[in-house]
Image: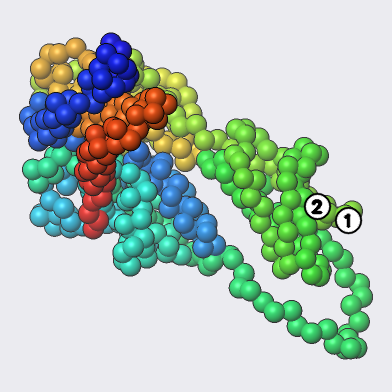
Amino acid sequence: MKKFFIPNKENSYKPYLLRKIALVLYTAILLFVNTFGGLLGIPQAMASSISPANIIQLTNQQRTASGLNTLTSNAKLAAAAQAKANNMFELQYWDHYGPNGETPWMFISQAGYTYVYAGENLAKGFRTAEGVHEAWMASPTHRENIMSVNYKEIGVAVVEGTLLGKETILVVQMFGNQTNQIYKPTIPAPTTPAPTPAKPLIPETGEIKSIKITNPKPNDLLNDANINIKGETENTKGEYTVEILKEQEIVGETKSSTKDWEFDKESDWSEGEQVIAATLKGENIKSESVTFIIDTAPPIILQETIKVKKLDNNFELSFFAPQDATELKFITGDKTYEIETAIGQTVSLNIPESDLGDRSILMASDKAGNITQKDISEYFLEEVKGDEHTSPIILGLKNIFGTTDGISLSIVAFVFILLSIQVYYSWKNGKLGKNIGDLFTIGAWWLIVLVGVFKGFGGLIS
C-alpha cells in the first residue's frame, strides 16, 4: 500500500496514485459521474448548505446591519412557499406567475395568511445559501424585498427536483405583514455635538437620569437566540456605558452617545427563561427587570409514528402530534390542509388521491414560531408500490455522499492530500527540484478540476 500513497525508493518517489495513468482515471470518473450521474440515480446537487433556517438567518443579518427589524418565521408563509415550489415542479415553469394564472398572492392566501403587504423572491440552481442571498442582494428588485420596511414575517422553502429537464434546487422566499404597521431603520444618523452656550437660557434643574430596556418586551417568547438587547436613556450627556445584568451578573456592556443603545452579546442566549436588567456603569441607576423566553427548538414529528394507508381513492395519513405544536399542516402539490391540533395524540387526515402532488410535506410550528418540515412523499409512493419504508439513516447517508458534487469534491480532496504528501517527501529527501515538473503538472490538473467543480456554485433568481 505504501507504493500507492507515499513517495519512496520502491516507486521512484512517484506514488502510483499520483501518476499520469491515475490522473486519467480520476478524470474519467469525474466525467462519467457528472455526465451520466443522473441516469444512475445520482443527484446533481448537494443541498445540505441551503436550508430555510440559513436563508432566514442571512436575511435577518442583512436587515439588522441596516437597522431594520428582524423578520419572524411564519408557518403559513412557509407553507405558501412550499406550495409554490411544488406547483413550479409539477407544472414545470420558472416564474412568479404560473401558466394557469397562479400568482404568489394566491399561494399566500390559500395558506391562510391574510396579508396587507406581501412579496416573493425565487432562486434556482445555487449550491449555497450565501450564493442565493448574494445574488438576491445584487438585484435591485430582490434587494428591495429583503430590505423592505413593510415586512414583519418570512417563510422559506428549499426543494430539490427536476425543473425544465434539469436537476436543480429551488428556493422560494415569501415575505408578509398582516398589519398596517411598518418599520423605520433604528440606526441613528451621525450627529455633530452642538457648541455649549456660555450661559444656558434655561437652567437644567429637576432632571432625573433613567434607563430602560425596550427590546425584548416583558414575557416575549423568541426563537432567535442571538437577539440584541435594545433600550434608551433619559438625561444622559456625552458617551456613556450600559452594563447588561443577567440574574445580577454582568454579561457584557455597550457604549452610546445618544439616548438609544444596543447590546450584542456576541453569543447565543441560553434556552429557557432569561431575566435581565440594564445599568449605567459607575452610577446607581438601574432599569426594571425584563423577563423573556428563548425557544429555538422546533416541534419534532417522530418518523416511526407516521403511517400512510391507501383506501380506495383516498389516502389516510396518521402521525403523533408533537406536544409543543400549535399549528399542523399537510402540503401536497399546491394544496394545503390544516390539521386540527391534538397535543400529544395521534391525528389522522384523509387525502383524495386526485389531490396528491409529487411532493408531500408535513409541517409543524410552535408558539415561538419554530417550524419543522418533513418530506413524506415516499410514504405515498411506497404505499402504491407496496414497498417498505427506507431507513432514515440510509436516506441521510445517501443525501450526504450520494451526489455528483460529493463524489467530485471527494476526488479533489483525495488528490490534494496525495499531492501534499508528495511535496513534503520530495522536499524532505532533497528531490523537490527533480520532481518539480511532475508536481506542477499534477497541481495544474488539480486546480483546473477544482475550478470546474466550483464553477457550478451559482444559479438564477426571479
- Helix, strand, or loop for circle 2? strand
Q: Image point 59% across, 39% down: which residue?
A: 268
The x and y percentages for residue 84 are 23, 47
Q: Which mark is residue 108?
A: none
Q: State which quarter of the image contains the N terminus.
A: top left
Q: Position of residue 364 (x, y in %)?
A: 39, 33
- In depth, the one of 185 and 288 nearer the eye is 185
Name the residue type under label 1. Glu
Mark 2 is surrounded, within 10 Å at the Cα level, by few (under 14), some (14 to 19) or many (20 or more) other residues, namely: many
Point 74% across, 50% down: residue = 253
Mark pair 2, 1: CA separation: 8 Å
Query: Disc 2 designates what residue?
Result: 279
CA neighbours of label 1 inside 10 A, class few (<14), some (14 to 19), many (20+): few
Asked whether, in this view, residue 127 is left or right of residue 39, the answer is right
- Identify the image's colour scheme: rainbow, by chain, secondary structure or one colour: rainbow
Left or right side of 283 for 318: left
Q: Secondary structure at mark 1?
A: loop
Q: Amino acid at mark 2?
A: Thr
Q: Position of residue 215 (x, y in %)?
A: 64, 53
Which of the 4 image quadrants contains residue 431?
top left
Question: Which numbered marker is on residue 283?
Answer: 1
Q: Position of residue 203 (x, y in %)?
A: 91, 82
Task: Say if 120 sits above or below 412 in the image.
Answer: below
60 vs 306, left or right, is right
- The quarter holding residue 225 reads top right
Report whether residue 73 is seen: yes
Name the residue nearer the viewer: 286 or 452: 452
Give the residue displayed 42% in from the left and 47% down from the top: 56
Kindly indicate whether the residue at mark 1 contacts the one at mark 2 (C-beta within 8 angstroms).
yes
Please state which of residues 454 and 125 is positioned toward the viewer in this rendering. 454
Q: Is residue 335 visible?
A: no
Residue at image location 12% in from the left, 13% down from the top: 386
